[in-house]
Image: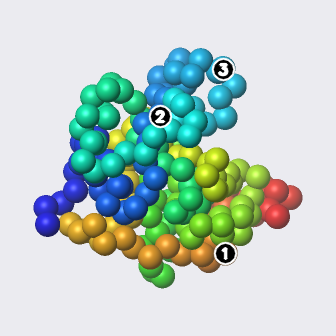
Amino acid sequence: MEPINTRAPAAAARAYVQLGWPVSLGHRLRPRQGCTCENRDCPTPGAHPVVSPGPRLVEASVEEMLQSTPGGSLIASTTHFDAVLMPFRVGMVAMLQLDRIGRVPCLVTHGRTAALLVLPATGRYAAVHDGVEVRTGPEGWIALPPSNGAIWDTQPWVESTNTPHPLMHGEDVGREVTAAYRMAIGTSETEGALR
């Protein structure tokens, strides 16, 4: 199998659909202008459906759907995984340790945010600091590469296949995120915020 080009929306969308993820098209995140939903306080800019619930993409109609919504974001509801979002620096420190244990799918956005994907309904165990956000269940959404400047640090599938990496439990990830906060920011600054 050829390597999957996650910078090409159609190829990326097909790969996500083949993983069984509920992929939809969502609002766009515009630089310095916010989400196209026009809500100035949008909690998930560029990472929620235009119409809720958004129609799921199917492999046969990926091209047609993408052409019908130019510039729309590829988004997935967090039903097949929980997304654990944190500052980029903390996420990369955690990933260095997690890579010794196994492959944790991780996407990064504009070098500001890292999102680690864990087993469904276990993300809460990784919410070890106020700077960690967990998106979970059918009402949680995340933008997928190449949307909104997101790229994969660690792809969710084995290289050049559509075989998914097994997801880790949020508790295992949470241990490394706790350690990463201590290393990245300093124990004295985070002690009061760790929970």
- Tag on residue 171? 1
Q: Which residue is mark 3?
A: 40
In the rendered image of this protein, does residue 36 appear above or below residue 142? above
**Quadrant of the snapshot with the C terminus:** bottom right
Q: Is residue 37 above or below residue 98?
A: above
Sequence order check, earlier mark of 1 and 3: 3
**Residue at (47, 34) in percent of width and height:** 26
Quadrant (top left, top right, bottom left, bottom right) of the N terminus: bottom left
Judging by the rendered image, the residue that carries numbered circle 2 is 26
Considering the numbered disc 2 on the image, is that residue within a helix, a strand or a loop? strand
Instruction: Give the quadrant of residue 192.
Output: bottom right
Q: Is residue 8 left or right of residue 96?
A: left
- Between the residue at mark 1 and the residue at mark 3, the CA separation in whole angstroms equals 34 Å
Q: Are marks 2 and 1 in contact (CB under 8 Å)?
A: no
Q: Position of residue 13 (x, y in %)?
A: 32, 48
Q: Residues within 10 Å of mark 2 (few under 14, many from 20)?
A: many
Which of discs 2 and 1 lies nearer the camera? The answer is 2
Residue 127, quarter of the rendered image: bottom right
